[in-house]
Image (cartoon, rainbow, N blue to C red):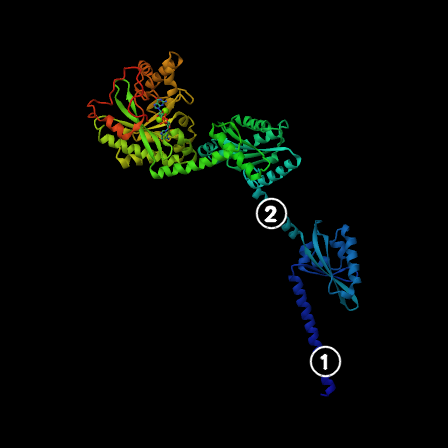
Amino acid sequence: MSERTEHAAERRADLLDAERMLRKGEQRLQGILEAAYEAFVALDAEGLILNWNAEAERAFGWSRAEAVGRPFADLVLPPAAHARYRREVERLRESAADRSVGRTTQLRMLHRDGNEFPADLRLALHSADDSHLIHVFVRDLSDREQAARDRRRAEEELAYQRLHDSLTGLPNRTLLLDRLGHALSLARRRGTALAVLCVDLDRFKLINESLGHAAGDEVLLEVVERVREVLRASDTMAHTSEDGLARLAGDEFVLICEEVGSERDAVGVGERIADALSAPIALGAQKIFVSTSVGIALAEPDATPESLLRDAGNARHRAKERGRARFELFDPALHARVADRLGQETALRQALERGELCAHYQPIVSVRDGEWVGAEALVRWNHPDRGLLLPADFLPLAEETGLIVPLGRWVMEQACAQAALWQSGVCRTRPYRVSVNLSGHQLLHDDVKAMTIEAMESSELDPSRLAVEVSETVLLDDANGAASTLADLRATGVRVFLDDFGTGYSSLSYLHRLPLDVVKLDRAFVSGLDEQGAKQQIVGAVVQMARALRMTVIAEGVETARQLDRLRELGCHLVQGYHLARPMPADEMTARLDPAGADGAAPSRRPLTQSGDGPAGPTRR
Ligand code: C2E
Ligand code: MG
Ligand code: MG
């Protein structure tokens, strides 16, 4: 073979190889185009479709066979987009020198089903032979737009949640502080006054705990609706709006009042809210009464959002303390009181730990023969600086702080241990019952039954030697299930006394429904017995009624012989009061219970007929 022919053959083989490779390349290219996530369309110089990949089929709804040969613009662009598209193509041709760059533009495109969608179009010129082809890559943006919308919505939702209470949709503390900040600076600029009201539902916790959280939520929603109605009514004296209302926590709401003329205006708004909330709330068949405590703080020149909120909260706290359902205005002296309270709380906590508490006992006396048949345990605090403190000085604080629970347990243990000593000692031969006061808070927050049984067991006290005293209001307010707790306790043999009868609802008719052994007639009734009159009849009726229900009546607070005589006439069997004996330390009671006491007589049996003597017993408490 000549060199020449050899060369020609090589050349042909090369060409064949190149062609094969080219075809392979084309196939590979088409393969790539088919697998692409983007729609790809190739157009000839006239704008007719030459190539159309699978993604284009999906994006526009036309098959490759249907699309090829048709004008691109007519097929996939809505009329409104035609002019833009043509301009883009012209610019692309003008910049043909720089053809690799292409042009990107966003257009609305048309699906076969008539729906338009946003798309990113990338146009590129491609030279083939002597004409220019146009390659179009199309990215459907509707998903991305949707995703962006979703993200925006999620972000908005999150921001909302961060600043609002999920139940009521009201602003939370964070947003409130922000709004309060704005309101304060506006008030300063305009020279107007600003007040903050802190509204708290009394006894809401009780509703929640007894009726369940769903019921509690319903009550809260109704409360918010009523407050909104008040705010919508344009006749409030101060400028209030729903935007100024927020929920701080649980049952605590805050309202910003702008442009108040005086404290009186702010109080007026509070009154309207309290009025609106005083009507019962229907919960299914039940009617719930909520009452409110309102604290009000007016912005001082140096007020900050935080200080205003704190002051209104403190005033609200004081409103609650002074008897619920009332208003209280913040005054700076409150700061001192709050600090003082904190100190007292710590001191009371330490009193428990350091053994500064003690129990005194006041005899319960039989009217017939003057015999001491039992005693009521009454807690005292031997304060290192202030001397012996009475329950009124520290029990309210104990209740509020929850310290009443350990305190109450301590009294129960102490009383059981003491009663057990009397049971096995001076009162071996006669029943001598010790009664222990239980507060409503204890019944709500402590397992009173288990606590009592534990105390009796560890001191080996017979249950028949123990009684618990519960005040009337606790039992009537029976949302907390106190009655059933007491019934359980009573089943173990412990007696249940109704304390302070007559201070609450004073209705005799419900007595038979309660698990009771004894009704203790409040001092308020007994003190009225010195004169003839209505009190006399009431006491007589209570004694009769109790008899009919097989309950015993103990008259409390008997201070004079005259009262005692009347009680005897009215058929009351047991009495308690300074006239008979004051509360005393356990040792003293032991000594006086002992028949072989100092003077040899039985000091616990003093004749009760004589009148006019002062307080009995050597100790005053
Ligand atoms: P209470 O259960 O009604 O106790 C009777 C209160 O009347 C006692 O006051 C007693 O000292 C006082 N008293 C007794 N006789 C007379 C009298 O002739 N005239 C007058 N003016 N008062 C008399 P105290 O010890 O100050 O207790 C007050 C209240 O504190 C008690 O009322 C009781 O509700 C509560 N309390 C006392 N100790 C405890 C306790 O350990 N736990 C609980 N939860 N509450 C207690
Ligand atoms: Mg009592
Ligand atoms: Mg009482």
| Horizontal and vertical percent position of residue 401 | 43, 36
**Residue 43 lies in quadrant:** bottom right
The residue wearing badge 2 is: 155
| Horizontal and vertical percent position of residue 270 | 56, 28
Q: Does any atom of ligand 1 lie closer than 8 Å to the CB of label 2?
A: no
Q: Mark 2, residues whose alpha carbon is within 10 Å: few (<14), some, or many (≥20)?
A: few
Nearest to N terminus: mark 1 or mark 2: 1
Residue that appears at 35% across and 22% down: 520
Total tally of numbered discs in the picture: 2
Q: Is residue 428 left or right of residue 116?
A: left
Q: Is residue 619 left or right of residue 321?
A: left
| Horizontal and vertical percent position of residue 317 | 49, 33
**Residue 492 lies in quadrant:** top left
Label 2 SS: helix
| Horizontal and vertical percent position of residue 184 | 61, 37
Residue 11 tag number = 1
C-alpha gap between disc 1 and disc 2: 67 Å
**Residue 195 lies in quadrant:** top right
Q: Mark 1, residues whose alpha carbon is within 10 Å: few (<14), some, or many (≥20)?
A: few
Label 1 SS: helix
Going by the numbered disc 2, the residue's amino acid type is Glu
Q: Is residue 392 left or right of residue 27?
A: left
Q: Is residue 528 above or below residue 218?
A: above
Quadrant for the C terminus, please: top left
Q: Nearer the viewer, mark 1 or mark 2?
A: 2
Residue that appears at 76% across and 52% down: 81
Going by the numbered disc 1, the residue's amino acid type is Arg
